[in-house]
Structures are given as structure tokens and as C-alpha cells.
Amino acid sequence: MTSATQLHNFQFTQPLTTQQEAILTPDALDFLSALVEEFSEPREQLLAARLKQQERYDAGELPNFSEQTESVRLSEWSVAPIPKDLQKRHLEITGPVDRKMIINALNADVDVFMADFEDAQSPTWDGIIQGQINLRDANLGTISHSDPVSGKHYALKPNPAMLIARVRGLHLPEKHVLFKGRAISGALFDFALYFFHNLNVRQNNNSGVYYYIPKLQHHTEAAWWSNVFHFTEQYFGVKTGTIRCTVLIETLPAVFQMHEILHALKEHIVGLNCGRWDYIFSYIKTLKRHPDRVLPDRQVVTMEQPFLSAYSRLLIQTCHQRGALAMGGMAALIPAKDPQENSKILEKVRADKELEFRNGHDGTWIAHPGLASTVRDVVAKYIGDYPNQLHVLRADDAPITQADLLEPSQGERTEAGMRTNIRVALQYIAAWLDGKGCVPIYGLMEDAATAEISRTSIWQWIQHEKTLSDGRVVTKDLFRQLLREESDVVAEHVGPERWQQEPFAQAIELLETITTADELTEFLTLPGYELL
């Protein structure tokens, strides 16, 4: 065990174990240092540009297609051909980089497991480094786990799912690693260590190093990632396209930039994904000062809402025009033990996936292996033996306009919906502060995105003095009253032992602070990270 120390060009704020030093090797840190030196300042410029753009939205401007890049949208071009092992991605499962969960996900009846360093992972230092160890072992095929409580042993079965890693977004720092006295980018940290430790084994298996890239807002951010990928391939002397990525379209500005994002990454990108929950959160955040765009209860903001349906169809049309996969969104439902209740859950999942595959999506996401067989049935109906639906071009669709993508949602704002938002956000924040980034709550697998929707909805209702269905105006005082009442409900629900063990007091304070602030906190994970 070494104390908090300087290694190469980095200062680590935590002492490093021998196991962690096996990941933070001199050669790995040399590579990370090269990336940080090259790309930190451009990243800061991109984040500053985001703030400037948001100021324009707050002043009344609406997101729209860019006149400056019209030629990209109108010209003929395609992304690089998709590698064979990424062409069939009918069903993907996602989850944190926890060792047992990785094994279960890779063994599930799915095509891909997306190992998530971002929304499903609480970024504790131990969790992030252990995640890299776990993914290294998973790629080597040596990963196993013995549960100290149950005594159960977990190991990989033959022919596990394809592994893709999702790195953190551009906005997230890695506060435990300082470069010239400043926290480095969490995205670069995750990207660099995963690439360094898994390149050889992936190449030996005739594959590449595959990523999901989250939270992009503009094609200039995609170009930053393209530069990172080219730099990395040149640094290691491997061919262009060794790195392949799928980009999540989970911010409202990005939906107007899909051609441009594909074009900026055309040598490395294989598809776009409808990150629907973060997209709803981004709709609220981007249009936070527009009183005519306030969303109703979270429960009624489904993919059948016109603005979400337009988003899904435009993503499919754009991707297939350019030879890229169009991945569908997350079914956050989890199976129930009661057979009747479970039957209802599976029917909801089936209906959701029927809509996606009927629209032309090439694959979709689930949060629990118990949903796999239901979704496989839907895939068989719409795709059959085809690896994907790239042939579904939606060329006869009416043009999807700015108005379609921004159409206000119909539906009520209710006391019950507000109370549910409070309970979900409170339980999720407490779990996240306790080191768990993916939590089952009331029959849904919640991650940071759904907690973000819950708390920003209430913030926006307060700011615009919206009324509930019973006529009451949503105020800070009403929120504080309901927060006190729902905290008692949650305390009873989780029991006194868990209430004392998990940081619920901190969670209540954080939730109240960010929900009653006059300025919207951009991501709850930023002030939350300071408390980890």
C-alpha cells in the first residue's frame, strides 16, 4: 500500500492498493497523460460552448437544425462499414461495472452487455478502478465471483455476450486524479484505461475495442471524440477503425445534429441509440425557461408522446440513410414475483418493443435478464434472421420538423406524480451516495437519468408556478412539505436499519437544495460527487 502520491504526471488523492497499481501501470499512465495533455483544453472549450448555447435557449431561442451544416445533411456519404461482430445487436442489457452483475449480464440471453461507468455507476474511486479490473478479467474470460454471504459462485458460460463499455460524459471529472493540480476528465480516464488493458485480447479475438459515448450535445463534441480515437490508434500503431463507438442521442440539442455527429465520427461510429430517459431529462433542462414546454407527470411521458415518437423515427431514418444502426431505448421495468403482476409487466414491455421494431429499430435495451425472452419474441416477429433493419429507410415519411421534435406534451401534473418523483429521487440519491448507481425502486430499474427527470420536473413546476390537477400552485413550500411527508413514507418502506445505514439525511438535504434553487443544477451527480 502506497500513500496518496505522485505517479508519472498525476497526483492521486487516494492511497493505491497493489491491485489498483496493476491497472495504473507506468505505460497506462503514460498513455493517459498524453491524452490529458492533448485534449483537456479542447474539452474545457466544449463545455464553455455548452453554457453559451444554454444561455441562448434561456433567452428564448429554441434548438433547431443548423444552417451552417446543411451541406452535411444534404450530401451523399456513409459511415464506415460496420464490423461483422457489431452488425447483430437485437438485444442489449446494461448495468454497472459490478463484478457479479457483469457475469450475470454476459451470461444472459442477449447480444450485447453495455458495462456502464456513467449513469448506472456511482463513481466511487474503488468502484471505478474495480470496474476496470472487472472488465479486463471479463475480456480475458477469467472473471469469476464468489458471494461471501450466499456462498454462490459465478463464472462465465461459453459464448458470452459482446462487451461494450460506456465511459463517463464530458462534463464529469475524475476528482481522485489530478493533472497539474486539476481534476482530469472522467471520460478520458475511463476510455484510456479500458483501451490500454483490453486492446490486445480484443485483437487476438479478431475484434476491436468498442464504446458507448454518452451526453453529446453538438457535432464539435463528436469531432473531439474522433480526434481522441485517431490519436489513440496512432499512439498504439493500430489501424483506423480499431475503435468503434455507438453514440447515445440523449440530449435535446443532439437530435438536431444527428447527421453531423455521424459525419464527424464516420470512420469510427456504428450507430446511434435512443437514450430516452436522459433525453426527457434534457428536454426539461434545455427548455427550462420556456413555460409552454413544461412536461406533465413522468408516468405519462411515454414514447407515444409526439416529441418522443418523432425523435425515434428521425433517428432511424438518419442512421439507415448513412449505413449506421439505430438502437432503441431502455425498458426499465423489472419482473415481479406475482404471476399476474408479471404478466402485466411483460405485456407493457412487449408493447414498447413492438413499437420500436415496427418503426425500424435494429435493436433495443433491457435492464433485467428476465425480460429477454419477451423481447426475443418481438425481434423474431420483425427482424427474423436478419442481423438488423438497415433496409428500413423510412424514405416515404413526411419530413420531421423542429416543431415535431419540440411539441409540448399533453397530460396532467398531479400530487401523486409529484410524490412519486420525490420518493424515487430520494431513494436513488441515497443509494448513489452509498456507492450504488443502479437501483430497483417500485418495479423499475432506476439510474441517474430517471432521478434527474424526477427532480428537474418539480424544479420546473416551481419556477413556472404550474398548478396541480387539484388547482394548487406548485411552490417551494409545497415541495418541502411533501418532501417531509414522503421522507417518512420512504423511512417506513426501507425500514429503520437501512434508513440509518444509507445516507438518507444527506440525500434529503441535497434533494431539497437542488430542487428549491433558483438556478437549475445541471446534473445532480456533480454536487453529489462532492459528497462521495
Image: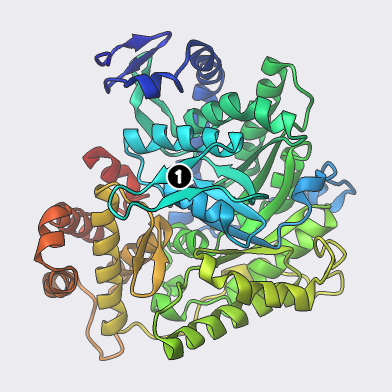
**Above or below for 345 versus 157:** below
Which residue occupies the extreme right position in the image?
Answer: 76
The residue lying at 52 percent from left, 61 percent from top is 279
- Left/right placement of residue 115 relative to residue 414 reads right
Residue type highlighted by circle 1: Val
Q: Quick check: 90 left or right of 512?
A: right
Res. 253 visible in picture: no
Instruction: Estimate the x, y position of residue 284 in percent, counting from the top left.
Output: 43, 64
Q: How far from the left and from the top, in percent, is residue 424?
A: 30, 68
- Figure quadrant of residue 321: bottom right
For image coordinates 47% across by 42% down, the residue present is: 144
Quarter of the image that includes the C terminus: top left
Side of 330 relative to 257 (left or right): left
**Residue 285 seen by the camera:** yes
| Residue holding disc 1 | 97
Quadrant of the rendered image containing residue 38: top right
Q: Is residue 41 left or right of residue 91?
A: left
Residue 211, percent across and down? 62, 41
Crowding at dot 1, Cα within 10 Å, few <14 / some 14-19 / many 20+, comes out as many
Q: In this view, does 288 lie above or below 309?
A: above
Q: Nearer the viewer, residue 273 or 478?
A: 273
What residue do we see at 57% from left, 55% from top?
107
Instruction: Name the residue located 46 percent from the left edge and 62 percent from the top edge.
Output: 287
